[in-house]
Amino acid sequence: MVEQIIHGMHAVQASLEHDRDSLIEVFRDSGRRDGRLEKLVAALEKQGVIVHGVSRKELDKLAGETRHQGIIARVTVPATLDERDLEQLLDRLEEPPLLLVLDGVTDPHNLGACLRTADAVGVHAVITPRDRAAGLTPTARKVASGAAETVPLVQVTNLARSLKALQERGIWTVGLAGEADGELYATDLKGPLAIIMGAEGKGMRRLTREACDLLMTIPMQGTVESLNVSVATAVTLYEALRQRRAG
């Protein structure tokens, strides 16, 4: 376990609801009068969490450059999951897996947004490379709005090798690429599935692309050439959810 500072009401609320024991102490802006904040502080204190009232200046210093909404918390977080944890997770599933793979997404805002959508859609795990990719920073946790506590994030040493291991389990690996011939809405996304999204601006790396069973694209009708990775992830995952519910 390691210690981390988390910012914002969503992140603190999620820690209270999903892992109360992770909360070490909380700092709130004593001069801020906000009904939502007061309700959260009351819930924290009811559960025995120590809440310190500090000035806005002190809170800004503790939070650094991150917007904190008047509250931050010092928490313990588990070490990041790895390949062995992913295998155990897949062994426990009683339904076809739905996985999201992010190949080199380095912006914590995009990682947080992808985790939030993954939670909403019911993704079983998000997989990223261990190197040259965003991790669960305080910013990513804040943007995830609680999803960082509910969606397993697995960091793997060799992404291409991990995709091969998924294929050996019968999981279909489908990558999103702007130049692909097949369209998202014409692709079967109902079975055991791993959806692979590329990095911001660069797309998937060559070895990742070669490891995919199939490439597909999101049809674009306007003048822009591509979507932000978190937006493209949301579009793709919700199409997968639509198909799986219809099927």
Image: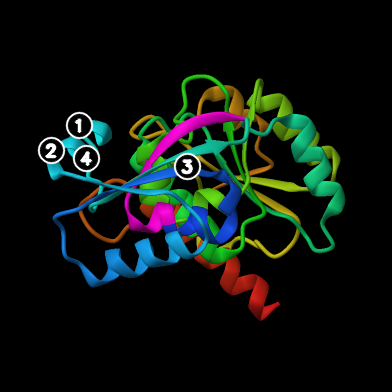
Residue displayed at 73% across by 48% down:
172
Pick whichever of labels 3 and 4 is earlier in the sequence.
4
Give whichever of 52, 168 is nearer the camera: 52
Q: Find disc 1 in the rendering and name its residue.
A: 61
**Residue 177 tag number:** 3
Is 246 one of the magenta-colored residues? no
Instruction: Sort mark 4 into few (<14), some (14-19) or many (20+) by Cα contacts within 10 Å.
Output: many
Q: Position of residue 147 (x, y in %)?
A: 50, 54
Label 3 residue SS:
loop
Q: Amino acid at mark 4?
A: Leu
Q: Find disc 2 in the rendering and name its residue.
A: 57
Label 1 residue SS:
helix
Is 11 one of the magenta-colored residues? yes
On-image quarter of the C terminus: bottom right
Q: Position of residue 21 (x, y in %)?
A: 60, 48
Asked whether the residues under the numbered discs 2 and 4 touch, taking CB atoms below 8 Å apart as contact, a structural biologist would say yes
How far apart in space, not on screen, are marks 2 and 3 (Cα)? 46 Å
Span shown in magenta: 1-12
Q: Quadrant of residue 61?
A: top left
Q: Find disc 4 in the rendering and name its residue.
A: 59
Label 4 residue SS:
helix
Q: Is residue 231 above or below residue 159?
A: below
Residue displayed at 43% across by 60% down:
45
